[in-house]
Image (cartoon, helix red, strand yellow):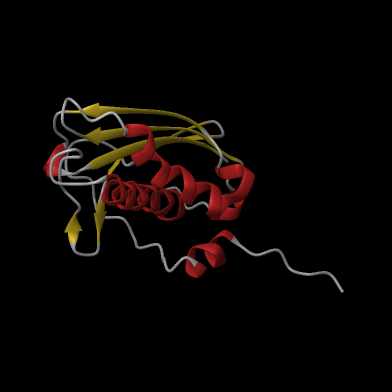
Amino acid sequence: MSQKRQSAKDRLMMLGYELAKPSAPAASYLPIAKSANLIFVSGQLSANEKGIIGGVLGKDMNIEQGQVAARHCALSILSQIAFSANVELDDIKKIVKITVLVCSTPLFQDHHLVANGASDLLATVLGESGKHARAAFGVVALPLGAAVEIEAIIEV
């Protein structure tokens, strides 16, 4: 008897997450843009059901809190794929690249560790398809006071 492969949605649920329908863009842009077999996901701000996860890394947020914020950005990326692009998570061929912006003090140097919050979630939920190229860097401010913003390029 063959064993059924666990779906990405099942892995998300095992981690205690469920994808929510994304809210409308807060400005003049598309949440996603498709080109051939690529989906470009606009920057997703760190937010949860209570609202924006804000703060400044190296000032009023530590690395672990930043990783939680980044994880919520990754969940929003998956929500955009599922709802805005109408693509099943198991149909994602590859998370090609993510770009991670971290609101931080000038002396903060652990942007890469904050970004791991998103990278680790994507790899756990999507397996090999979730492993990606990445850029992570610090910025002085993000929209709506968010601590983290992440954009993604995804192959379907």
Residue at image coords 48%, 69%: 13
In this rendering, position of residue 71 left or right of residue 56:
right
Q: Toward the viewer: 112 or 89?
A: 112
Question: Residue 114, position in %: x, y?
Answer: 34, 41
Image coordinates for residue 129, horizontal then vertical, percent: 60, 43
Q: Which residue is drawn at 19% across and 33% down?
A: 104
- In the image, is 130 to the left or to the right of 66? right
Numbered label tally: 0
- Pick whichever, 61 or 15, lies toward us: 61
Instruction: Report the residue that reaches farthest toward the right.
Output: 1
Residue at x 63% of width, y 44% of height: 128
The image shows residue 69 at horizontal and vertical percentages of 29, 50
Location of the C terminus (image quadrant): top right
Residue 130 sits above or below residue 35 on the image: below
**In this view of the protein, can residue 54 be seen by the observer?**
yes
Query: Residue 53, image x and y in percent?
Result: 20, 52
Q: Residue furthest bottom?
A: 1
When the figure is inspected, residue 43 is found, relative to residue 138, above or below; the finding is below
Rendering quarter of residue 79: bottom left
- Viewport quadrant of the N terminus: bottom right
Depth order, front residue of 103/89: 103
The answer, for residue 32, to whether it is visible in the render is no
Res 43 quadrant in image? top left
